[in-house]
């Protein structure tokens, strides 16, 4: 179910911080028209850390409604507590999502056994496809390969978004979890290499800005066409870098605004992209052929 170019969707906001429903609808249609394979709503790139629970419900509901079963919708439902994650995951299920992306619980720093019990409990209480999300740079918590391999035995834990920065780790997990767990890159700059090694896709920030190129990259890499994948990725390499020149989603929201799809709204403590960084993002967008 979960493969290819999966966009980690930004959440459109007005300058005063409210959610812009019209732009959200337009953004979803833009991705469907561009061939995006699936959408993640209210993930990290969707500013989940600054949205209220009610706002998360609202965005998930709107995305599910607009998509209308045309492509899979995945909701980011990870919280610091197991109880909070179960509650949000159950609500996302009731709203009609196809799966939930659940990051390692941030800030609390559980042991590996605690992580196993956390995900096992969620999977047992929430009968929906679950994507593990390992992003230690944000959570201060690393789901080690041994723990992933144990979790892969749970039937409704179906995929892993791996953003540890280690291609060797991804290759180990692809080998050891073959047939049990789908491996997805959590980092655009490694996406090509992950898919050529046997991964099935990427949950992508870059896809917000260059969805057709990311779709083409994923299609080429998944079928093993390394030459074409290299060619496409070369046009996107600067964008992969520039979209993280400041904390995500600051640069990507500005870039999507520059495409005319959303307003400049972003929520404190994040601020709009610094003036001295805009030229670099613009140049990367031009190289990617989206301007």
Image (cartoon, rainbow, N blue to C red):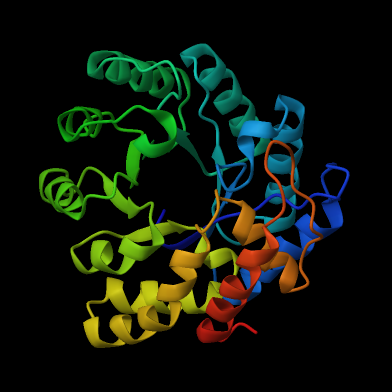
Q: Is residue 198 left or right of residue 115?
A: left
| Viewer-nearest residue: 137 or 79 | 137
Left of 94 or right of it: where is 86?
left
Question: Quick one: quadrant of the N terminus?
Answer: bottom left
Left or right, 143 with reference to 85:
left
In the rendered view, would you say 34 is above or below 12?
A: below
Q: Against 105, is 42 above or below?
A: below
How far across and down, in percent of the image, does residue 212 sit?
Answer: 53, 78
Does any portion of residue 132 appear in the rendered image?
no
Q: Position of residue 9 (x, y in %)?
A: 61, 54
Residue in view at x 36 percent, y 23 percent: 119
Q: Say which of 238 and 164 sits in front.
A: 238
The residue lying toward the viewer, choosing from 243 and 82, is: 243
Please state the total of marks drawn on the protein image.
0
Which corner quadrant of the image does residue 123 belong to?
top left
Which residue is rendered at x = 14% and y = 52% of the image? 168
Rendered position, 77 above or below 276: above
């Amino acid at each position: 179910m979960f493969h290819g170019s999966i966009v980690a969707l930004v959440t459109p906001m007005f300058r005063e911080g409210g959610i812009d429903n019209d732009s959200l609808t337009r953004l979803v249609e833009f991705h469907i028209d561009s061939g995006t394979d699936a959408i993640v709503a209210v993930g990290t790139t969707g500013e989940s850390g600054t949205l209220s629970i009610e706002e998360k419900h609202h965005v998930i509901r709107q995305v599910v409604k607009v998509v209308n079963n045309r492509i899979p919708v995945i909701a980011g439902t990870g919280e610091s507590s197991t109880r909070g994650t179960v509650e949000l995951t159950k609500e996302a299920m009731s709203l009609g999502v196809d799966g939930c992306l659940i990051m390692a619980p941030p800030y609390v720093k559980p042991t590996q056994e605690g992580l196993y019990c956390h995900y096992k409990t969620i999977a047992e209480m929430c009968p929906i496809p679950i994507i593990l999300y390992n992003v230690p740079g944000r959570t201060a918590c690393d789901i080690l390969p041994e723990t992933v391999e144990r979790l892969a035995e749970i039937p409704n834990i179906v995929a892993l978004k791996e953003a540890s920065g280690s291609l060797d780790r991804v290759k180990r997990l692809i080998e050891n979890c073959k047939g049990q767990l789908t491996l997805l890159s959590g980092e655009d700059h490694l996406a090509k290499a992950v898919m050529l090694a046997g991964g099935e896709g990427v949950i992508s920030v870059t896809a917000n800005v260059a969805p057709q190129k990311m779709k083409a990259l994923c299609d080429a890499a998944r079928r093993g066409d390394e030459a074409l994948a290299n060619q496409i990725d070369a046009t996107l390499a600067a964008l992969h870098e520039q979209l993280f020149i400041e904390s995500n989603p600051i640069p990507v929201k500005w870039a999507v605004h520059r495409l005319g799809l959303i307003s400049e709204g972003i929520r404190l403590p994040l601020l709009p992209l610094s003036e001295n960084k805009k030229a670099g993002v613009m140049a990367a967008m031009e190289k990617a052929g989206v301007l």
